[in-house]
Image: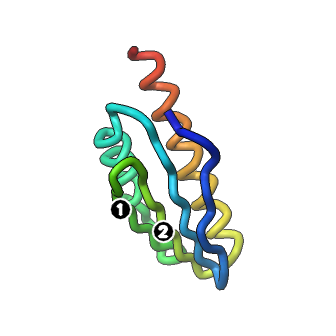
Amino acid sequence: MVSGPLRIIGLASHRSNIEMSIESPHLDEIYRALSIEASDLRTRRVSVTLSREADSILLRIQASDVTSLRAACNSFLRWLLAIRSTLDLVR
């Protein structure tokens, strides 16, 4: 599902851009599931935006501190793994 490693594009001043290259017919579903999590954040310490490219999802995280940035990165990567595991079970 994820083709190759995740590529961290930028990490400076409490910002991170993570491009996830995903080879899956379920890319739209993965994007929608992550979008729900991004829009449902209930904190002023982190801002997350998602965009979809042809075969990848770009996750942009901006945080007020390094701890919040790390927590947000970990959360979204875990959600991606949970979505992947669920799709593998459904197949």
Q: Quadrant of residue 50?
A: bottom left
Quadrant containing the C terminus is top left
Nearer to the camera, 6 or 66:
6
Q: Nearer the viewer, residue 14 or 64?
A: 14
Q: Which of marks 2 and 1 is nearer the N terminus?
A: 1
The residue under label 1 is: 51
Label 2 residue SS: strand
Mark sitting on residue 60 = 2
Question: Residue 56 at x, y = what percent?
Answer: 42, 51
The x, y position of residue 55, in whole percent, is 38, 47
* Contact check, label 2 and label 1, Cβ < 8 Å: yes
* Vertical relation: 23 (above or below) 91: below
Instruction: Provide residue 47's location: percent of width, then percent of height.
Output: 46, 73
Labelled disc at residue 25: none
Q: Which amino acid does label 1 sit on?
A: Ser
User: Where 2 sits versus 12, above or below?
Assistant: above
Image location (x, y in percent) of residue 38: 40, 59
Residue at (70%, 74%) from the top-left corner? 66
